Image (cartoon, rainbow, N blue to C red):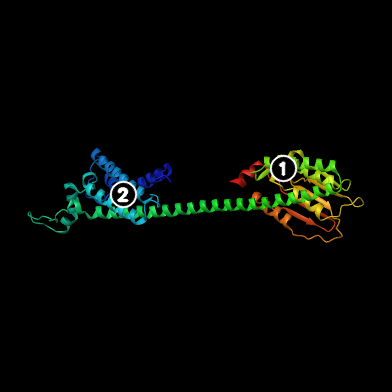
Amino acid sequence: MKVLTRRRIFVNLVVAAIISLLMTFPMIFDIMGFGPVGLNRNYQHNPFRLSDLVTVLKSFLFFLTMIFGLMVIYTHSSHLLTWTKKIFLALLFAVLCYLISPVIYQPFKPKDEMREAMDEPIRREIKNPPPEFEIRRGPEPRRWLEVRRIIEFSFILALTGLIGKIFELTQQREIIKLENEKLRAENLQSQYNILVNQVNPHFFFNSMNSLSALVREGKTDGALRYISELSNLYRNVLHNSGKDLVTLDEELKSLSGICYMFLVRYEGKLFFNINVDESLLNRKLPLFSLQPLVENAVKHNTITEKDPLTVTICSNEDGTLSVRNRIIKRKEQIEKSGTGLVNLASRFRLMTDKEIIIENDGKEFCVTLPLINGKEDENTNS
């Protein structure tokens, strides 16, 4: 982490400039005649002098340098300096500035004519003062122990410390927020990888069962074609490995190999009707979204020549994709683990922040998948 960034330097300069301006306001008011002496009606304010402006500028630059130095100390990285060390360094720096301040920074002091103006109300209260009457004043305070200077420096030290603490707490909150987002993204990616790894072995197991059935039935040509399509399918899987989302066009190309393998196995009994609007082919969805739906339809329905099964994949007017099939219940009881649909719903929730819609009215089973465009994909990844 960088000790100082451009943003931090800019913020420290702005804070230092604002506080410095606040500290030099009394001197500016004195120049303009709004000070406690200048407001005295019996005091004729002196015309503007360049030396007074130079004094104000010197004081402003002194405060600016001092406050900026304190802000740099207080906003330093907490990993490098603890808060106790920051306070110690700030006190040390403030004392150093205090010792050199009489040389650089000197508030206006009443001059002779100002003193006379301030003494006038006292003189008027005493009627007929003797000629030797004189208003005696105490000795001037030592330049190194001026109360006003001590109060000003204490105020600056406390104010910059408070602002520095606020900045530190704000920065810690941002760091915690970024770390939480990072952990959340890593957790989502880990969950997604686990879900994808559940899909591949499941499909491979079913594919081997189908191939074994073809071999047992003596369908050598079908088995060879089946192996070829299976090889092409896994070639596409390797090509898309590492991708969380794929286009609908890529998903349909991968699905074509799966459909062929099912058509070989259920020749004349299983049909696929794919009708997708071409404008949706570039939209995206999680990898292996259609495969478990087709497998689910084949697994849980009777497929015979008398009752053939048709799986329809079609796009909808709202830009979604539906996979539907007529329900033909098997006579034998099939154990329903629910892993396929739960897996699919979890992957859509993790990768697109959207939910799939599952409809079952007893006659038709339909799953509707949301598709996301490029802009939604960028927002999801961010």
Q: Residue at x 82, y 48 (%)?
A: 311
In front: 240, or 368?
A: 240
Callout 2: few (<14), some (14-19), or many (20+) C-alpha neighbours within 10 Å? Answer: some
Furthest-left residue in view?
Answer: 132
Mark 2 sits on what residue? Answer: 23
Mark 1 sits on what residue? Answer: 234
- Let me know if residue 280 appears in the view: no
Q: Residue at x 89, y 50 (%)?
A: 308
Q: Position of residue 314 (x, y in %)?
A: 79, 45
Horizontal side of 300 relative to 34 (left or right) equals right
State the separation of the CA atoms marked 2 and 1.
74 Å
Please tell me which of labels 2 and 1 falls first in the chain: 2
Horizontal side of 53 relative to 215 (left or right) equals left
Which amino acid type is shown beneath numbered disc 1? Answer: Tyr
Which amino acid type is shown beneath numbered disc 2? Answer: Met
Q: Residue at x 31, y 49 (%)?
A: 23
